[in-house]
Amino acid sequence: ALAALFALVNAKHEQYIGWKSYFVGPASLEQLTSLHSSSNKFRLDILSRPTVQTAGVILVHPESQTDFISNLEYLGISYSVHVNDVKIQLDRDDEITDGWKQSLSRSENSTLPFDNYQDWEMIVSYLNETAVRNPNTTTLEKGGLSSEGRDLYYLKISTTNFEDLSKPIILIDAGIHAREWIGIPVATWIINKLTDELNETDLLEKFDWIIVPVVNPDGYVYTRENDRFWRKTRSNNTNNWECVGADANRNFDHYWNTEGVSQDPCDETFAGIEVFSEPESRFIKEIINENLARIALYVTLHSYGSTITYPWSHRIGLSNNALGLHAVGITIVNGIQEFALPQFPRYEVGSSALVLGELISGSSDDYAHSIGVPLTLTVRLPGLIPRSSAGFILDPQYIRQVVTETWNGIAAGARRAGELVN
């Protein structure tokens, strides 16, 4: 039995045998653009998007490594090996998270640990219990079912049961990309700070809140149990039964399927068979449309990269509200910096196309902004300490740090948004 168990554990990440990951640091916007334009030639998986200021992390298939390195050298882009054996490192990452499970501490009033990554069932229990404990302010809602039949949950938090139509709404979501684990405890921590551990009462007096802690539960569960780097949903919307799912953050109705997407169902940026083909993108669309008149600020949590970006993503040009967007982004960064650790890079703020050096279409933030949400921001949370020997997860010892500093930034950003919108 022990031998069988060992074999099972040892086989968990076997699809990544021979893969390597690299730190890649373009020194100019021209190099960054060249990197993106050439990347579709190789079997790459961009785990952390490089910017001109900060190196990214790129996962490379064994068959592509020689050509990928030759291309970097041709372009003059600096690089170094991040992880020499991806499968072995993933096994080590599992050991780290399993070790932390043995010594979870809980917030004083909370039923959810913030010292490790949270299981789906644990999150569902927490949402239910939070609504029961806070009946005067908190309502648990369902926005339909995922492709695999999981409820799509969100919490509405309000002192007036969402009946005061003069109050602006702050919308937060996380986990639209399955592998971006750190956003989920940030979202649940925000729930915690607005309910069980409410200290900043002005944030409930002035605003109503909608929090979606896991947009893509099917994908999240799949990353926990099967493929750590799975990014998409788990839908079966094509005739290709070997390749399931779509990138839900390329599936929104804003220049859909035009930039930074793939039409191959096997690719991680597959935009779906049609606009809003995915239950998860429809879920967010319906929340936005239902509350459109009152949403002042929409923050979608991703990882990793230490960037805060705003529309537009599909083109270089700026939004007409770029000054307001930038102001709120800077306010969030300043709030984060009050608690930030020196080993994490300072956040960059700017339009998505300029900061990331690539165009993408069909994203949730661009969609929300295009139909009238004045302030929409994508926050890419910190992941790896730059140039470290860390693996593919933010070490659980840093989770509480990240959730605390991010909440401080979002609280400040909400207040700034309230000033700008009213």
Image (cartoon, helix red, strand yellow):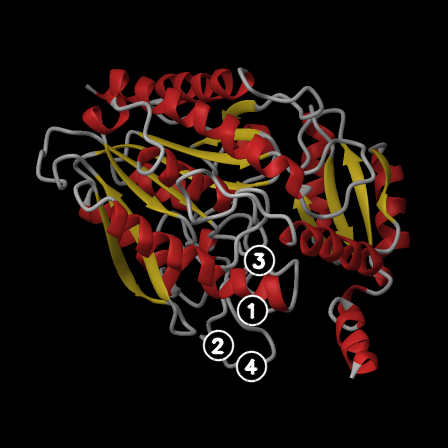
Distance in Å between CA atoms under marks 4 and 2: 7 Å
Does residue 156 lie above or below 63 as drawn? above
For marks 1 and 3, give the one nearer the viewer: 3
Say if residue 351 shows up in the picture: no
Dot 2 crowding, Cα within 10 Å, few <14, some 14–19, many 20+: some
Q: Amino acid at mark 4?
A: Trp
Q: Amino acid at mark 2?
A: Thr
Quick one: SS at disc 3? loop
- The tag earlier along the polypeptide, 3 or 2, is 3
- The residue drawn where x is 42% and y is 53% is 256
Question: Would residue 30 be found to the left or right of residue 280 on screen?
Answer: right
Say if residue 399 shows up in the picture: yes
Q: Amino acid at mark 3?
A: Arg
- The residue drawn where x is 9% and y is 34% is 164
For marks 3 and 2, give the one nearer the viewer: 3
Distance in Å between CA atoms under marks 3 and 2: 17 Å
What label sits on residue 157 in the rendered view? none
What label sits on residue 238 in the rendered view? 2
- The tag earlier along the polypeptide, 1 or 2, is 2
Q: Amino acid at mark 1?
A: Pro
According to the picture, the residue beneath numbered tag 4 turns out to be 241
For the N terminus, the image quarter is bottom right
147, 8: nearer the viewer: 8
Task: Locate residue 204, reporting x and y percent.
Answer: 24, 29
Question: In which image quadrant can residue 147 be found?
Answer: bottom left
Question: Would residue 152 be found to the left or right of residue 50 on screen?
Answer: left
Q: Are marks 1 and 2 in contact (CB under 8 Å)?
A: yes
- The tag earlier along the polypeptide, 4 or 3, is 3
What label sits on residue 231 in the rendered view? 3
Question: Would residue 76 be found to the left or right of residue 107 on screen?
Answer: right
Quick one: SS at disc 4? loop
